[in-house]
Structure formats: C-alpha cells, structure tokens
Image: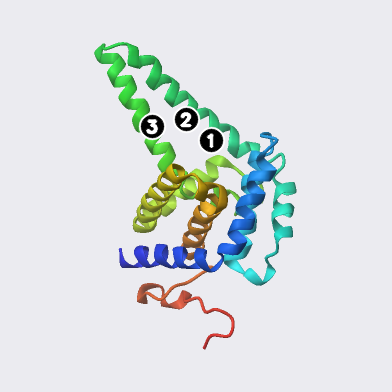
Amino acid sequence: MNFAFQTLWWGIKESFYQIGRLIVLNVSWILFSLPIVTIPAATLGMAYAIRVMVIDETNYSWKVFIEGFKRYLLAGWRWFIPSLLLPIIFIYNILFFAVENFTLSIIIQAANIVMLVVWSFLQTFTIPLLVEQEKPNMRVALLNGVKILYQKPGIYWFTSIFLTVFLIFSTFIITPIIIFSISMSLFISMYCLQVFLGRRGIVPDEESSKVYKKPGSK
C-alpha cells in the first residue's frame, strides 16, 4: 500500500512540474476535438504525447501531439466505439427498466449498474495502455489493465479513486476541465503505468532498482 500511495503521490507532484505543458495539451485537445469526429485521435494523440513526456521529457515537444493525432486519426476509433457504445447500452437499460417495478426489472437494472461501474473502473489505464501498443486493441488493453489490478491492486485502486474524485470535483467547478483536468488525469494515470512497467521509478525499497533520477541529480 505504501508503494501504491507513493506512486500516486509522485505522479501528482510530477503533473504539477509539467503543468504548463499539460495546459497547452489540454487546450489543444479541446480545439482538435471540436469537429467531434476527431475526438478519438485528439484523445489518443494527447496520451501519446504524455507518454513521451513521462518516459523521457527531453524528447517531448508539442509536435509529438500532432504526430500522435495523425497516427490515431483512424485507429483511435477502435477504442472510441466500444468506449462510447457500452456505457450508452448500460444507461439505456437502466432507464428503460426503471419504469417497471417487477423483480426481474430490478435485477436487470442492478446488473447494468454493476456492469457500468466495472466498465468505468477498468478504464483507469485503458488509454495509456492503448498507446503502448503498435496497433490499438481494446481487448488487449483491458486484459493488461486486469493484469495491473491483479499484480498491483493498490496502484489500481488508489489511482482509480483519486481520478474519479478529481474529475467529479473538476466537472462541478468546470474551469479546471477546460484548462488542465483531462491532461493532468492522463498524466497521472500514465505515470503510474510507467512505474508499473519499470520505465519510471520511485523511492520505496521494494522497487529500489527502478529509482528515477532527474537529469543533473546525484
């Protein structure tokens, strides 16, 4: 648990170190998503840029976002379609069966609520895992997410709970969503994933071989 908490904490701290870049990425994501059909490419393009920022910020520039946008212009729909359709189906079933009070209707409602919560929970690392693949595959990303949940449940739970609270809070305030909330959430999720994969490290003894040192540090 200590390792999981420190991983999340360092992810949050690093996101503040990169706040200027994250604001630029967040605003770019909004602008590039305005045509609607480009939302998948803009989202995965931002994740692609953040991955470079997390792993080796010396190779990062805003052009990486454009590179990612072009790369996922079509491939991004492999993620977006199931991510959009499944929640719509779950919510439709919940609302459709809400008009009846039969036992079967209540059971179906409850099942769809559970599936919606589970689906949302599994999205914590889905986007970061997609940009780890040469060709985005939703099924592979979800399975890899389950692997993280099994091997490092603390990281998964801490990250999921924090991002849920952070995004809900930001939505109520509205302004942070426009300025930096989406990109910061992706950064934290990406940071925790890279620690899990061993490309970033933190101080705990159990991961002492993976300690990350910033350029110029001793």
Which residue: 63% across, 69% down? 57
Residue at coordinates 44% horizontally, 68% vertically from top-left? 10
Q: What color scheme is it?
A: rainbow
Instruction: Categorize mark 1 by other alpha carbons within 10 Å: few (<14), some (14-19), many (20+).
Output: some
Identify the amino acid type marked 3: Met
| Crowd rating for badge 3 (residues with CA inside 10 Å; few <14, some 14–19, many 20+) | some
Choose between 129 and 182: the one closer to the eye.
182
Residue 123: % across, % down: 47, 44
Name the kind of residue labelled 2 in the image: Pro
Q: Which mark is residue 87?
A: 2
Q: Read off the residue under disc 1.
A: 83
Give the number of the mark in front: 3 or 2: 2
Expressed as whole percent of the image width and height from the top left, the position of residue 21 reads 62, 62
Q: Is residue 31 left or right of residue 8?
A: right
To which residue does mark 3 refer?
115
Position in image of residue 30 (x %, y %): 63, 45
- Most extreme residue toward the left, as rendered? 103
Determine the CA span between mark 3 and mark 1. 13 Å
Residue toward you, 216 or 122? 216
Q: Residue at x 39, y 51 (%)?
A: 149
